Structure formats: C-alpha cells, structure tokens
Image (cartoon, grey):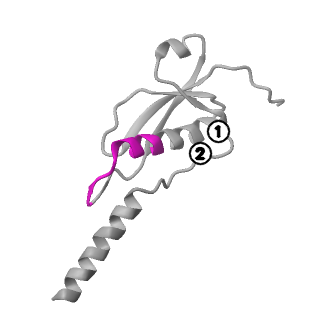
Amino acid sequence: MMKKILIVFCCVLLLLILSSCAWVKVSPKGEGVRLVQSTRTIESCKKLGNVNAKVVGKVVFDRDAEKVAGELAALARNEAALIGGDTIIPISEISDGRRTFAVYQCFQSNRNY
C-alpha cells in the first residue's frame, strides 16, 4: 500500500514539475516579431493574415494562465515570421489552450527577393 502511495506522489510531483516548464521556444526568426496589445500600434501596418496557436492548457489540472499565454505568443511569433510578419496582436481570448493572432508587417523589410 505504501509503495502505491509513493508512486502516485511521484507521478503528481513529476506532473507539477513538467507543467511549470516552458516547452515552446521562440525561433531565431520569431525573435524579430513583436507582440502588441493595442490596435493603435498596428494602424499603419499591412495585415498579412491570421495564425492560430495551440498548446496543452490542462495536464490533470489547469496550467498557469500566464505560461499558456506566453507559449501561445511564442508559437504565433514563430508562425508570423514564416509569412513575413513582424508584429502580432491577439484577436481572441485563450480557450482550451488556443488563441488566434493577427499578423502584420509594420516595418520595411530588408529582404531582397
């Protein structure tokens, strides 16, 4: 009986440790994409489209809302960079570990095509 309790305790502890880790990293290209909260910031920008980000929002229990939001933003920054965006703004609330972001190009691109 004690062995089962110890196993359950260890599993719960492991889940707590894993849920506190940030699994999503911003890519080198994503580093060039900024996250803004105000629509005034993107008034003079060109909209390129939307990206949908999804992470695990619950592992036995709800994950920390701030960590989930940060991971969603990191994923969106990475995706925005792939379509040539340099700015993202959330356009939905977080629901079930999902969020939609609008992608904009606000700065002149130095790329030569």
**In the picture, residue 97 is in which quadrant?**
top left
Residue at the spot of label 1: 31
Q: Which residues are magenta?
A: 60-71
Residue drawn at the location 55% of the way across and 16% of the way down = 42
Q: Which residue is mark 2?
A: 26
Identified by mark 1, the residue type is Glu
In the displayed structure, 58 sits above or below 35; it is: below
- Residue found at the very far right of the displayed protein: 112
Q: Cα distance, mark 2 to mark 1? A: 6 Å
Using a 10 Å C-alpha cutoff, classify the residue at mark 1 as few (fewer than 14 neighbours), some (14 to 19) or many (20 or more): some
Residue at 37 percent of width and 30 percent of height: 92
Residue type, label 2: Val
* Residue in the picture at 59% in, 35% down: 80
Are the residues at dot 2 and dot 1 in contact (C-beta closer than 8 Å)? yes
Residue 107 circle label: none
Q: In terms of sequence position, does the residue under pointer 2 or pointer 1 come before the other?
A: 2
Q: Is residue 108 above or below residue 83?
A: above
> In the image, residue 76 lies at what x, y percent?
52, 38
